[in-house]
Image (tube, rainbow, N blue to C red):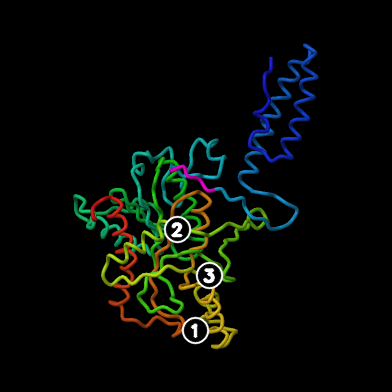
Amino acid sequence: MFTSTTFLHRGLPVQNRIYYRSIKASIWKLLHSTTANITCFLFLSSLKVISTVSSILLNCMGTVSDHSEYSEPEVLFKNPQIHVKNPHLDTMEEDILYHFNLGTKTHNLPEMFGDVKFVCVGGSANRMKSFAQFIHQELALPGNMDNVTDICEGTDRYSMYKVGPVLSISHGMGVPSISIMLHELIKLLHHARCIDFILFRIGTSGGVGLEAGTVVVTDKAVDCFFRAQFEQVVLGKVVTRSTELDVGVSKELLQCSSELDDVPTVIGNTMCTSDFYEGQGRLDGALCSFSTEDKREYLRKAYNTGVRNIEMESTVFAAMCRACAIKAAVVCVTLLNRFDGDQISTPHDVLVEYQQRPQVLVAHFIKKRLGLVV
């Protein structure tokens, strides 16, 4: 009647397998009695449910211990499809992407987004609209570039524009805002069955030992302790995720920069902080409990560990992309050298030109990938 129970423990840790083998042995003893067949069937069915629940918990939580902190097991996938690490999504009749004003029942996501190959995100809604118009022109697409439509116009949280194979989305300011956007963006790309795409964060930052206007392609996103990790509190426990980014994409971006005029570019670590003032060692906030020398010493430590710029989103961006096996890069221009000061006093027209440099670099990368430039 029963030929195998291997499905009960496949993919579970060794200690769980031993547990299931002992149960399996007991079940086969019961099978010698024909009157126990129904009981065994019900017992096996319940164990299958337990196994499924165990797999879900293990997949979602990583390695659980009695401590309040643990590192999530890291798996890098070569499959070009996105890897959404949430089995609960498969049991949902509808997934509402609330902050995008999109849903799996209300919109045909594969038809709308299935051809996306490049996703560019940035803090400012206006800047990402400008990028959508710019990439429309760069790709020589038909139609008027001024007529790009905000797909998320039904919500005031984020803006989204689709231009050919390119998706341009705003994410607001700081880790919480970009985190919400990334959860829904990654699910959107999953539901749309997108494959072989690259995700870019393009934005602005404060330079560390670099002249204003320098573009930094992030090697590793580090926290305020210069650690290449992001800590997320989940159900009262700290989950630690790696923030390393795709080396191949970074090197390709650096090569692209050498083919452009007036886009000075370096590869370095990017420090992500929780705020703009105290967290970045600024002396000009409403609160300040440290001296000028304290600030300079901290910046020197940051520089010596490889940090070349500071912003407020890179760690969660890198961590979520790596956890879901998404090729990604962070490309930010520096608006000032933090060793020289805290306030941005550069003329507006110069700042606008600086802010366009990451867009120009990523656009050149996209055109090369599409075979539009040699």
Q: Nearer the viewer, mark 2 or mark 3?
A: 2
* 205 in the magenta segment: no
Q: Nearer the viewer, residue 174 or 369?
A: 369
Q: Residue at x 56, y 64 (%)?
A: 228
Q: Residue at x 72, y 38 (%)?
A: 16
Q: Is residue 362 found left or right of 239 in the rendered image?
A: left
How far apart are the two marked residues, 2 and 3, measured between alpha carbons? 23 Å
Q: Quadrant of the N terminus?
A: top right
Q: Nearer the viewer, mark 1 or mark 3?
A: 3
How far apart are the two marked residues, 2 and 1, measured between alpha carbons? 36 Å
* Image mark count: 3
Q: Which residue is mark 2?
A: 247
> Main structural element of the magenta stretch: helix, strand or loop?
loop
Q: Which mark is residue 132?
A: none
* 78 in the magenta segment: yes
How far apart are the two marked residues, 1 and 3, measured between alpha carbons? 16 Å
* Residues at marks 2 and 3 touching, judged by CB atoms closer than 8 Å: no
Q: Is residue 280 found left or right of 367 in the rendered image?
A: right
| Placement of 229 over or under 191, stated as above or below | below
Q: Which residue is mark 1?
A: 284
What kind of element bears circle 1? Answer: loop
Find the magenta span and give its range. Answer: 76-80
| Placement of 190 over or under 210, stated as above or below | above
* Residues at marks 1 and 3 touching, judged by CB atoms closer than 8 Å: no
What kind of element bears circle 3? Answer: loop
Q: Nearer the viewer, residue 327 or 334?
A: 327
Q: Which residue is mark 3?
A: 273
